[in-house]
């Protein structure tokens, strides 16, 4: 969910600073990611997206009504089918959990919490999987696992067919759906787990891999500082948009260079009053990911 | 490999007038519509313990020959294995879209129906508890319905719906209907000329919502806002259910003896 939101913010040009919080308790209600804007606190991805849209950072501006409807449908597909498999890979699969997820998480949150919180999230993930997909006639956990991975692979195939050869799901500019798909696929694609059946399957779908790579290189190259390029014109032709993006990124690079030269430490810049608080696990994979 | 469809295929659901609930009725109607669209005759049998007879614990289920299959997804695949399919004419991208929309309906509409039935206290007291255990004597009826309620609430909590208010759930339903309405547009069916399992599923849910009387009319009002959806339901009702007046599978109402609101 964190990478989904960052991707959406990047696509719609919302200026967002990503604060890593090292304790999930500090986020109200213990939920990450959390968007804090002035005094309003919003904590679920869907609500955060709605909020951003109302503030006029809308990446779906140019979609037709039918495409908007398609977006909703595909998001439901992702949540129903891909999410259980993702949860399982991260939190339930014993080897993955012990060797990757838990140390990541634990390294980012302070001591007493690091003993409790990963276990809690793991139990919640297992609970969710069993309650939503685990009814009869599937009686054992291994059967449930087999079923959800089968479904997830089919879902990936469907996404690949839908993407076809185009750059983004609705043409040449990214939209909410692209943010969602990226948010779900990027962890599978990039994180190095010992047990990787989903990743292997994904690698056999070249257009989805290309999609992830594109988003990462275009929009996340500058995540090191946690700032995102300033607003994006939504009214021009595609070529103009692309050239503008390139120009803005080069401007930003120049600005960053200036900043680094002027002060030894990177000054905390508040672009606007929007702050996105993301859980610790997010920036570390992206830091490892940026080429 | 296809055996012919037997004459005595039966679909099992709970008792129509007294027991069945909104969500189960919707699922059952969706399967009936699907089978009608495939031109496969089926008898509807009402049993109080239908839920327990079903292999997956969910209604409806069909008993064909010596096989028992439950829920729309597996039934569609089963029927396909027998050689009947509604979605063969679709290309790959359309099939992907169809799956996505079916998940949307399951994710939003079905979950909203379950929420309304089991997590909204007024509805639970006045409608769900009395209906769910009605074939059984006291105290079994109360025990069974509390048990089911506990199960459903657990599931809602796991997927994050427990924290939602009724207003938020209704808003989600509205969003879902809006998406369906936009996708349908002015076409007769979701994939233009031919009905598919998506049409059956949407019909099942929307028709049930429109014709079931609950404590408030808010849910059906949300659907009524979209005229192409109500026209869609009427069209399917007329085309696939008109000839079965006796069956009256299309005229189920949950509370009163009132006939279908679409008439």
Image (tube, coloured by chain):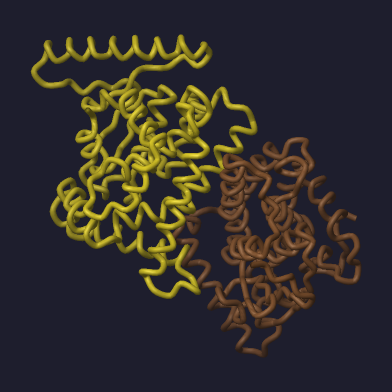
For the residue pair A229 and A41, the one nearer the viewer reads as A229
Left or right of residue A254: residue A5: right
Residue at 59% over, 71% down: B58
Where in the figure is residue A45, as x and y percent of width and height? 43, 42
Left or right of residue B14: residue A107: left
Seen in the picture, residue B84 relative to A74 is either above or below; the reply is below
In this figure, what is the number of numbered marks?
A: 0
Chain letter, brown in picture: B
Picture colour for chain A? yellow
Using the rendered image of the protein, determine whether residue A22 is visible from the camera's viewpoint: yes
**Screen quadrant of the N terminus of chain A:** top left
Where in the figure is residue A19, as x and y percent of width and height? 26, 34
Seen in the picture, residue B227 relative to B19 is either above or below; the reply is above
For the residue pair A187 and A111, the one nearer the viewer reads as A187
- Image quarter for residue B13? bottom right
Seen from this angle, which residue lies furthest left? A264
Residue at 31% over, 25% down: A217
Where in the figure is residue A11, as x and y percent of width and height? 42, 25
Using the rendered image of the protein, determine whether residue B131 is visible from the camera's viewpoint: no
For the residue pair A154 and A232, the one nearer the viewer reads as A154
Residue at 73% over, 59% down: B34
Where in the figure is residue A128, as x and y percent of width and height? 41, 61
């Amino acid at each position: 969910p964190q990478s989904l939101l960052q991707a959406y913010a990047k696509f719609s040009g919302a200026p967002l600073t990503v604060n890593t919080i090292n304790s999930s308790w500090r986020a109200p209600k213990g939920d990450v990611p959390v968007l804090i804007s002035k005094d309003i606190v919003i904590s679920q991805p869907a609500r955060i997206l709605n909020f951003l849209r109302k503030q006029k950072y809308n990446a779906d501006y140019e979609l037709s009504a039918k495409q908007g409807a398609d977006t909703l449908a595909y998001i439901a597909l992702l949540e129903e089918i891909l999410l259980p498999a993702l949860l399982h890979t991260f939190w339930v699969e014993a080897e993955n959990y012990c060797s990757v997820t838990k140390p990541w998480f634990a390294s980012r949150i302070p001591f007493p919490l690091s003993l409790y919180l990963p276990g809690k999230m793991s139990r919640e993930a297992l609970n969710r999987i069993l309650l939503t997909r685990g009814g009869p006639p599937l009686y054992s956990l291994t059967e449930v696992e087999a079923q959800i991975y089968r479904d997830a692979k089919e879902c990936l195939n469907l996404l690949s067919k839908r993407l076809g050869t185009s750059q983004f799901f609705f043409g040449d500019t990214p939209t909410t759906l692209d943010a969602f798909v990226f948010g779900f696929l990027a962890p599978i694609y990039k994180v190095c787990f010992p047990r990787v059946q989903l990743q292997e399957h994904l690698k056999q779908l070249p257009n989805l891999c290309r999609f992830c790579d594109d988003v990462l290189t275009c929009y996340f190259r500058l995540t090191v500082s946690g700032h995102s390029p300033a607003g994006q014109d939504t009214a021009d032709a595609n070529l103009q948009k692309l050239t503008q993006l390139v120009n803005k990124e080069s401007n930003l690079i120049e600005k960053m260079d200036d900043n680094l030269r002027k002060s030894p430490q990177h000054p905390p810049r508040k672009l606007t009053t929007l702050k996105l608080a993301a859980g610790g696990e997010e920036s570390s994979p992206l830091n490892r990911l940026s080429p | 490999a296809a055996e012919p469809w037997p004459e005595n295929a039966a679909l099992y659901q709970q008792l129509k007038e007294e027991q069945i609930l909104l969500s189960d009725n919707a699922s059952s109607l969706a399967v009936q519509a699907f089978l009608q669209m495939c031109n496969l005759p089926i008898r509807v049998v009402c049993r109080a313990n239908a839920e327990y007879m079903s292999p997956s614990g969910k209604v409806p289920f069909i008993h064909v020959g010596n096989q028992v299959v439950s829920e729309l997804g597996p039934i569609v695949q089963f029927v396909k294995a027998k050689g009947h399919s509604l979605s063969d004419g679709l290309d790959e991208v359309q099939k992907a879209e169809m799956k996505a929309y079916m998940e949307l309906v399951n994710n939003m509409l079905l979950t909203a129906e379950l929420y309304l039935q089991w997590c909204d206290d007024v509805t639970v007291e006045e409608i769900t508890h009395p209906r769910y255990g009605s074939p059984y004597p006291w105290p079994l009826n109360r025990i069974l319905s509390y048990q089911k309620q506990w199960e459903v609430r657990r599931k809602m909590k796991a997927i994050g719906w427990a924290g939602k208010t009724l207003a938020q759930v209704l808003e989600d339903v509205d969003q879902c209907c809006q998406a369906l309405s936009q996708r349908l547009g002015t076409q007769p069916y979701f994939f233009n000329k031919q009905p598919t399992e998506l049409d059956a599923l949407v019909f099942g849910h929307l028709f049930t919502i429109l014709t079931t009387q609950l404590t408030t009319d808010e849910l059906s009002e949300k659907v009524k806002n979209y005229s192409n959806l109500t026209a869609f339901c009427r069209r399917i009702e007329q085309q696939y259910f008109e000839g079965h007046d006796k069956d009256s599978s299309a005229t189920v109402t949950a509370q009163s003896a009132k006939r279908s609101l679409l008439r």
